[in-house]
Image: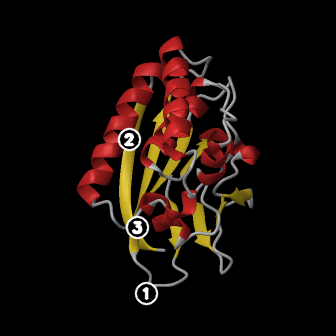
């Protein structure tokens, strides 16, 4: 599936956008290893950030400087208040874990519920919106209109990498995620990495 990203401000710094397609997967309850890892990681984040202003953390500020709606920030704010995220399913848990570990916006969609190509557009207000060719749309932080379910077999995942992360590092992180994803869900994966001004 092709992704078209509209450039709102060509003078802005470029980011890398990763597009991952998973096929023939099995979604289920997270294995105990992933559940435990997600819980322990949230506890470590709580102790690390409980007394900090999140927007002043360099890795987070890099995103808030260019986006108004940073998808992982509400999750981190909840963890900061010791309101930990419960396990949902294996796909969402792994996506959340990876997003929080590396401070990366990640959009995960049921590929069979959308019709390509998919467009990403940054609006003047600083939000990124996705839309498919049939008009289905939502904010980057909201995948509810094409959310993952136990019946999902094919997934489209989009990851935004900040300007400070090189193409080589971006590819390495994608490969790390896809390896873990396929280990848990089976199936196959392929990815593409593009560079766009945001």
Pick out the residue farthest to the top.
32
Which of pointers 2 and 1 lies earlier in the amino acid sequence? Answer: 1
Q: How many marks?
A: 3
Q: Residue at x 68, y 27 (%)?
A: 86
Q: Position of residue 104 (x, y in %)?
A: 48, 52
Residue topped by disc 3:
15
Please state the horizontal and vertical placement of residue 60, each as a whole percent of the image: 49, 59
- Left or right: 123 as drawn, with respect to 15: right
Vertical comparison of 65 with 131: above or below: below
Label 1's element? loop
Which residue in the structure is indicated by mark 1?
11
Extreme residue in the front direction: 51
Residue at 37% x, 67% y is 163
- Give neighbour class at mark 3: few <14, some 14-19, many 20+ (Cα, 10 Å): many
Mark 1 → mark 3, Cα distance in angstroms: 12 Å
Between 105 and 137, which is closer to the camera in this rendering?
105
Q: Is residue 82 visible?
A: yes
Q: Are marks 2 and 3 in contact (CB under 8 Å)?
A: no
Q: Nearer the viewer, residue 46 or 89?
A: 46
Name the residue located 59 percent from the left edge and 55 percent from the top edge. Answer: 116
Disc 2: which residue: 190
Residue 164 x/y as whole percent = 33, 65
Pointer 1 and pointer 3: residues touching (CB < 8 Å)? Answer: no
Q: Is residue 146 left or right of residue 107?
A: right
Whether the residues at callouts 2 and 1 have beta carbons within 8 Å, the answer is no
């Amino acid at each position: 599936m092709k992704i078209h990203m509209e450039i709102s401000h060509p003078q802005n710094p470029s980011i890398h956008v990763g597009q991952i397609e998973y096929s023939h997967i099995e979604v289920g309850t997270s294995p105990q290893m992933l559940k435990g890892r997600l819980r322990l990681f949230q506890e470590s984040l709580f102790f690390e950030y409980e007394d900090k202003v999140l927007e002043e953390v360099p890795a987070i500020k890099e995103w808030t400087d260019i986006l108004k709606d940073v998808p992982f920030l509400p999750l981190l704010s909840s963890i900061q208040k010791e309101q930990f995220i419960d396990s949902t399913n294996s796909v969402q848990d792994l996506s959340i874990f990876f997003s929080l570990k590396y401070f990366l916006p990640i959009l995960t969609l049921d590929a069979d519920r959308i019709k390509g190509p998919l467009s990403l557009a940054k609006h003047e207000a600083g939000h990124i919106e996705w839309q498919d060719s049939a008009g289905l749309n939502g904010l980057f932080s909201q995948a509810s209109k094409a959310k993952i379910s136990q019946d999902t077999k094919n997934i489209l995942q989009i990851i935004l990498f900040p300007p400070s992360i090189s193409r080589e590092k971006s590819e390495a992180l994608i490969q790390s995620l896809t390896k873990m994803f396929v280990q848990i869900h089976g199936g196959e994966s392929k990815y593409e990495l593009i560079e766009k001004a945001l």
